[in-house]
Image (cartoon, rainbow, N blue to C red):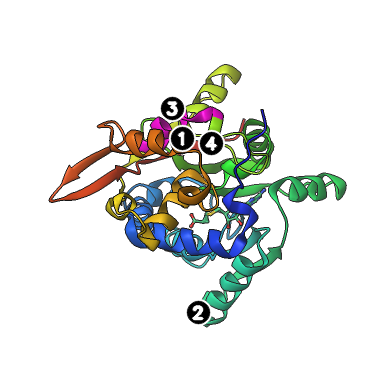
Amino acid sequence: MSSPLNSLVNDDGRYQESFELFLERSSEHQCMRDFIHSLLPDILGSIGNGKSHLNVIGVGSGAGEIDLEMLSQLRLKHPGVTVDNEVVEPSGQQLHNYRVLVSKKPELDWVQFHWNKMTAAEFEAQWKEKKMSKKVDFIHMIQMLYYVKDPGATVSFFQSLLDKNGKLVIILVSGESGWGKLWKTHRRQLCNTEISQCVTTGDIKSFLDSEGVSYQSYILPSQLDITECFTVGDEKGELLLDFLTEVLDFSKTAPPELKAGVMKTLRQPDCSVESNGRVIFNNDLEVIVLDPR
Ligand code: SAH
């Protein structure tokens, strides 16, 4: 059944606005930074086999803030190393923001950036067409596997590019997060778009288990304050609700039963907790780390 609801990703302006609000109201990037400074250094330390030049690919890098923090850790673990960094990002606006960020950091002269304004699938096609034999030491896909047609096949392709000791790092919302619960409850209405899928690390782990691929995983606890969503007519609340449901103008266009159902689910204890009068949604992320096959 096709949904009459319009997907938020069809309106890039509102999507970006809602994503920025989400970053403001959540500990999303903070919990990634904690990971980058606690667990990632050891993971990065194990790559490269003593090479003085490393190949890196970032898939769905957004504006690059998180990518640059990871690159700094990489350099700390491998002093003097030079890096070839392929950035794969289909949004022209995001790619532009990333380039501006890099242009303000002349100290990054040890990194050669290659800007690929394209999707992961287009990058894969190009890589195969050019019969690239280059192997890659570190690949990351952070909060982006929702937007590919076949997340499992995408993971397998990028894993196949890893050099000996290479690592593929995936971050998505955890299957046990509020997102997992929201999507499980309203899958039929909310998760039937072509562009975006409700995939969690639970789905990726099931895929890897079925393929007999081993991995390590770590939960990154994270929270999102959704209190404003419950104030009728609150603009920010409505914007956040669009982000949560991935539906454009959810409050105004969703059928009343769906709206009531979603508002109820958002308050369920396995989605949110109430603390000091705030409603705090469980935004836990999970990291999956893969070795070469
Ligand atoms: N990694 C960043 C951005 C996450 S948002 C962060 O964690 O902050 C998801 C990003 O994936 C967006 O920048 C979006 O433009 C990009 N994206 C969407 N579809 C994609 C696709 N098919 N292939 C690669 N990237 C995609």
**Disc with the residue nearer the chain's start (2 vs 4):** 2
Q: Chief secondary structure of the magenta span?
A: helix
Q: CA distance from mark 2 to mark 4?
A: 44 Å
State if disc 3 and disc 2 touch (CB < 8 Å). no
Q: Secondary structure at mark 4?
A: helix
- Which of 76 and 56 lies nearest the eye of the viewer? 56
Callout 2 amino acid: Glu
Given this view, does label 2 or label 3 mark the residue nearer the observer? 3
* Residue placed under numbered mark 4 in the picture: 190
Does mark 2's beta carbon lie closer than 8 Å to ligand 1? no
Q: CA distance from mark 2 to mark 3?
A: 48 Å
Give coordinates of residue 170: x percent, y percent: 51, 42
Residue at image point 39% right, 62% down: 235
* Residue placed under numbered mark 1 in the picture: 258
**Disc with the residue nearer the chain's start (1 vs 2):** 2
**Disc with the residue nearer the chain's start (1 vs 3):** 3
| Membership of 42 in magenta stretch | no
- Which of 61 and 224 lies nearest the eye of the viewer? 224
**Disc with the residue nearer the chain's start (2 vs 3):** 2
- Which quadrant of the figure has residue 117? bottom right
* Residue placed under numbered mark 3 in the picture: 185
Give coordinates of residue 32: x percent, y percent: 38, 53
- Looking at the image, can residue 252 be seen? yes
Q: Residue furthest front?
A: 256
Q: Which stretch appears magenta?
A: 178-188
Q: CA distance from mark 1 to mark 4?
A: 9 Å
